[in-house]
Each structure stands twice: as C-alpha cells, then as structure tokens.
Image: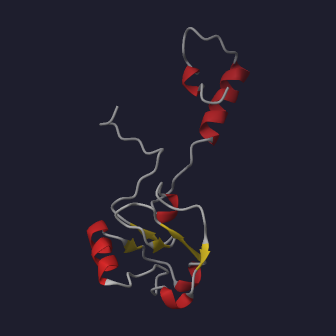
Amino acid sequence: MCGTAGTRNHPSIALNHTQRTSLWCCFVSQTQKVVGTNCYNCMYISNKEEPVVASELNDQGGIDPKTQEEMQKAQKADLITLPGWSKADATNKKICYNEKIKMFVTAHMCCAYWDNSAVRRPWKK
C-alpha cells in the first residue's frame, strides 16, 4: 500500500480513517527530513564511509582541495566547509559522485550542486 499515499483524499477510493492514517504514515516515513544542507544529505554522496585522517582535515572539519585541478573544481562548485565545526567532529569521509566534484568530502561541507530527491521545486511540475 505504500506508494499510494496520493490517494489519501481521492474521492473514488474509499478508505477508512485507519487505512488513510496507515498510508500517510508510510508515505511520511519514506521521505527523509532534511535539516540544513550538507554533503551527507545530498543525492550525490556515496553510502560508503571511509576513515578520515586528521592531517587531511582543515580546522573546521572539511577537506581542502589538494591539487590545482581539485581547487578549480571546488571554486567553480563553491565547495565550502561549514563554520562551527572542528577536526574532532569529522569522523569519516565519503566520495561525492557529482561529475563536477568527484572528491572526498565530510558532513561539514556543502556546494552549489547540492540536491536531494525530496526537494520541492514549484517551478518544475
């Protein structure tokens, strides 16, 4: 019955209160609640966590570009490390699979290409 949550108020489908509640709860539980944006709640992030070495982290727990090519990609993407964190807060890293990035990032980073499948864009119907 999951995936039919759009039938919640459909007049041709007769559901009792319990069935409607069950459908709605199922729909809501499948939608990730995103509070703030960072690389780890972006659709381009790998599921595989890898250990991070403290020496590769900047003071705020992000990973700075190592080569000139990475620096150019980071600048174009506005790949940033979010303020308020420290090296100690970054316990792992993941690869960003966005074609324009393809670098390791931490949860304390974000860029202009951030996206999530649950984002609502009213101009796209």
In which quarter of the view is residue 120 placed?
Answer: top left
| Residue drawn at (46%, 87%) of the image | 59
- Residue nearest the viewer, comparing 64 with 33: 64
Q: Position of residue 55 (x, y in %)?
A: 51, 91
Q: Quadrant of the C terminus?
A: top left
Q: Position of residue 75 (x, y in %)?
A: 28, 73
In which quarter of the view is residue 50 placed?
Answer: bottom right
Taking the image as shown, residue 51 lies to the left or right of residue 105, namely right
Q: Quadrant of the N terminus?
A: top right
Q: Is residue 13 above or below residue 32?
A: above
| Residue drawn at (55%, 10%) of the image | 11
Q: Is residue 95 above or below residue 9?
A: below
Taking the image as shown, residue 4 lies to the left or right of residue 114, namely right
| Residue drawn at (31%, 72%) of the image | 73
Q: Position of residue 28 (x, y in %)?
A: 60, 38
In which quarter of the view is residue 111 placed?
Answer: bottom left
Q: Count of labels shown?
A: 0
- Residue nearest the viewer, comparing 98 with 108: 98
| Residue drawn at (54%, 15%) of the image | 10
Q: Position of residue 19 (x, y in %)?
A: 71, 22
